[in-house]
Image (cartoon, rainbow, N blue to C red):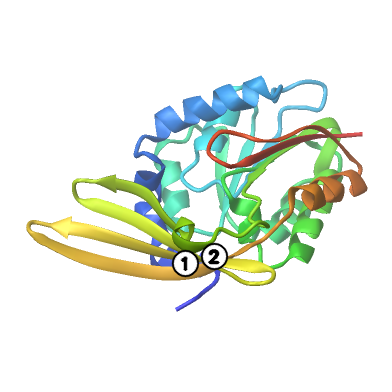
Amino acid sequence: MTTTASAHYDRLLAAHYTWMLGGDIATLAAQQARLLDELGVRPGRAGTEAVDLGCGPGPQSLALAELGFSPVLAVDTSRPLLNELAQHAPATVRPLHADLREVLPAHTHPGSVGAIVCMGDTLTHLPSAQDVTLLIRQAATSLAEGGQFILTYRDLSTPRTGEDRFLCVRATADRIMTCFLEYGEETVTVHDLIHTRTGDSWALHTSSYPKLRLRSVWVTEQCRTAGLDVTHDETATGGLRVLTAVKR
């Protein structure tokens, strides 16, 4: 059954998400802090307030806090992942259960935020391309002059074919995650299959959800149209597109 990204996390992925990332949030947070530092993301004249859109269990939120941002508003639609973040977040990180498309107007003031990040593959989880445009415009409004907007996402505009549509995400002794990609005109349906082992028995858990097929040139243009200067835009190791933009 294909469902929304939010429902897919509630139904299947949230329970396995930290394991899927490698299982150690502290290590992931340190890696993200290095990445953000290399991109020049740090508190400055734009202020210390930051927002992490689609924070999950918090590697980027913790990284922003480590770099000196305070407060860090950590936003997600998954309560289990927010609860996980709350277990190891410092007081400067504030978990918030909310719709990403509504949080910036409701919880920030125009021109007040020093950094907004939307990382992992969160951007492609939005329901439509129009929602992506709206979110980018909202980010531009919330950012202070000189504030930074950081995106990572997968450009799924070029379809995989044949056996390349089958991916092994992670495998350990008691858990195996694979996925199968099915391409439509505007979205790619991701079919996640997770096998879990108890003793000598294996159980299969499945769920499917759509991701937007966003072309990188289109995303870059949305940022520029919103009044953001794109300063970094390339595909990094692992296939994620990394974009950094600054509020004029």
Q: Is residue 121 above or below residue 91?
A: below
Query: Which residue is outermost to the front?
Result: 162
Label 2: which residue?
A: 5
Which residue is found at the position 17% from the left and 63% from the top? Answer: 202
Pick the quarter of the image with the N terminus: bottom left
Is residue 157 toward the left or the right of residue 207 in the image? Answer: right
Pick the quarter of the image with the C terminus: top right
On the image, the x and y values in percent for residue 225 come to 91, 49
Label 1: which residue?
A: 8
Q: Is residue 210 above or below residue 37?
A: below
Question: Which of the pair 141/112 is nearer the observer?
Answer: 141
Is residue 55 toward the left or the right of residue 142 in the image? Answer: left
Task: Name the secondary structure under disc 1.
Answer: helix
Residues packed near mark 1 inside 10 Å, few (<14), some (14 to 19) or many (20 plus):
many
Question: Which of the pair 155/230 is nearer the observer?
Answer: 155
Do tag 2 and tag 1 residues touch (Cβ < 8 Å)?
yes
Q: What residue type is labelled 2?
A: Ala
Question: Which of the pair 199/87 is nearer the observer?
Answer: 199
Which residue is found at the position 45% from the left and 43% from the top? Answer: 85
Which residue is found at the position 19% from the left and 46% from the top? Answer: 173
Q: In the rendered image, is residue 65 in sight?
A: no
Task: Name the secondary structure under disc 2.
Answer: helix
Q: What residue type is labelled 1?
A: His
Question: Which of the pair 136/207 is nearer the observer?
Answer: 207
